[in-house]
Amino acid sequence: MMKTSQLFALTMTVLVVGCAPESGGPIDLDAERLSILEADRAWSETPPDVEAFVSGFADGGRFLPAEAPEAHSREDIQEVVSGMFSPPGFSLSWSPNFAGVSKGGDLGYSIGTFEFTVDDAEGNPVTRNGKYTTVWRKQEDGQWKVVSDTFNFDSPAPTSGD
């Protein structure tokens, strides 16, 4: 049978070890949130460069584009993005307006708005606006990379004659 002093020592050890920070110090969540916003803004500079855009994804990242199937692998993401970035008149810009980060400082998300333009069949530019959510994971080297990106449009696609 365990003595009260032994039980107390064991309980205190579990509490101290269980509450100790993993990184050796407190995590500055505001700084991490700002880092996510910076990473998102830098990523927004990559289109129309397919390779640069795809390199923003972490290994195992997923792309969930509007009006298209989910892309599960880097090759699938590259194929989907190549198709998105190739139409005449292609233009894509986005801007994050909010970011959050987990208490552990290694997982976060950003939310923002975008503008997507391509030419229609007659060569006229068609612009659609929308919003997105991107989930980020901090890599071992300190960089934030995308683990999941999804977006949708604010309105239905225009039909012929609109």
Image (cartoon, grey):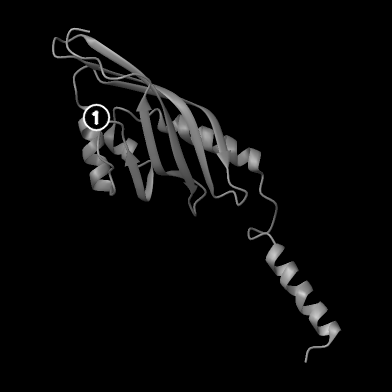
Residue 18 in which image quadrant: bottom right
Instruction: Determine the residue positioned at 82% across, 78% down.
Output: 8
Q: Secondary structure at mark 1?
A: helix
Q: Quadrant of the C terminus?
A: top left
Instruction: Determine the residue positioned at 63% across, 58% down.
Output: 23
Q: Quadrant of the N terminus?
A: bottom right
Question: Taking 121 as reference, is 68 left or right?
Answer: right
Q: What is the crowding at mark 1: few (fewer than 14 residues within 10 Å), some, or many (at least 20)?
A: some
Amino acid beneath label 1: Met
Residue lying farthest to the bottom in this orientation: 1
Indicate the position of residue 150 as horizontal and vertical percent values.
37, 36
Instruction: Determine the residue positioned at 34% across, 45% down.
Output: 62
Q: Can you say whether 52 is above or below 17 in the image?
A: above
Instruction: Determine the residue positioned at 28% across, 38% down.
Output: 51
Q: Can you say whether 31 is above or below 105 in the image?
A: above
Residue 118 in which image quadrant: top left
Indicate the position of residue 13 as horizontal and vertical percent values.
75, 74
Question: Taking 45 as reference, is 140 left or right?
Answer: right
Residue lying farthest to the right in this orientation: 5
Q: 134 or 88, which lies in front?
A: 134
Q: Give the mark count.
A: 1
Indicate the position of residue 146 as horizontal and vertical percent values.
42, 43
Q: 50 or 73, which lies in front?
A: 73
Residue lying farthest to the left in this orientation: 121
Q: 93 or 19, which lies in front?
A: 19
Q: Which residue carries the number 1 mark?
A: 84
Question: Taking 82 as reference, is 42 left or right?
Answer: right
